[in-house]
Image: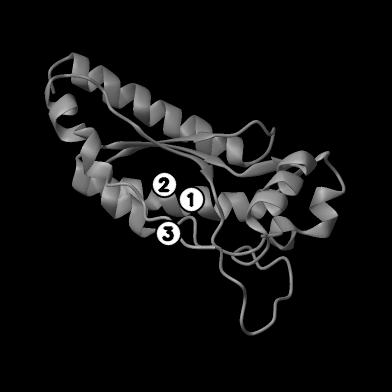
Amino acid sequence: MRRVPAPPVSACGCAAIDGSGFHVAARINPLFPIYPDGYFAGTREFPAKVKRLRYFDWKLIDMIADAGCKTIIAGFLRLSTWNIRWIREKTGKDLTYLFDPTTKQRNTAFHFGIEEKRYYYEKIRDLCDARAWSLVCATTETSPTRHSATYGQTKMTAAMERKSEGF
């Protein structure tokens, strides 16, 4: 299967739209993990060489910055068994290796554990904070990651209020 290049983020003209007084956000949803569940959280053992999924890279944050967008909305990958089957049929790739078997048994969908999602959200939050950006985490779980969503939403609301006041 050949890899499809990412579209140029700058094509959306985020800086021009933002400069006109409209709040612009880049949405990373679904946020595909880089490594299997538990890799960053340290909740699972892995061989020395871990298979990397190449649908997301931290460089995307830099691409969004280059485009002039100052808010990111992130939502983590969650796949139903039907989605997994369809992806396998169409691409030949079985993505079940990404998910911790104990996590996927607790839910009808394949999803990542709370600690692993927290790592991704907090890393993106830190990258946004370093640029004085806003982050909104889109999550449907009642988990500790909700605090990150609240944190991001509060920052986004404050940023929108500053923009409307002409700051």
| Nearer to us in this view, 84 or 14 | 84
The percent coordinates of residue 56 (x first, y second) are 47, 55
The percent coordinates of residue 152 (x first, y second) are 43, 34
Mark 2 and mark 1 in contact (Cβ < 8 Å)?
A: yes
Mark 3 against mark 2, which lies toward the viewer?
3
The residue carrying mark 2 is: 125
Q: Earlier in the sequence, mark 3 or mark 1?
A: 3
Instruction: Name which quarter of the figure residue 25 lies in.
Output: top left
Does 8 sit left or right of 26 as displayed?
A: left
Residue sitting at x 13%, y 29%: 16
Query: Which amino acid type corresponds to the residue marked 1 in the rendered image?
Result: Glu
**Marks 3 and 1, how far apart in space?**
15 Å
The percent coordinates of residue 50 (x first, y second) are 62, 76
The residue carrying mark 1 is: 122
Residue sitting at x 76%, y 47%: 85
Query: Which amino acid type corresponds to the residue marked 2 in the rendered image?
Result: Arg
Does 157 sit left or right of 63 as displayed?
A: right
Does 159 sit left or right of 44 as displayed?
A: left
The residue carrying mark 3 is: 57
Residue sitting at x 71%, y 42%: 83
Crowd rating for badge 3 (residues with CA inside 10 Å; few <14, some 14–19, many 20+): few
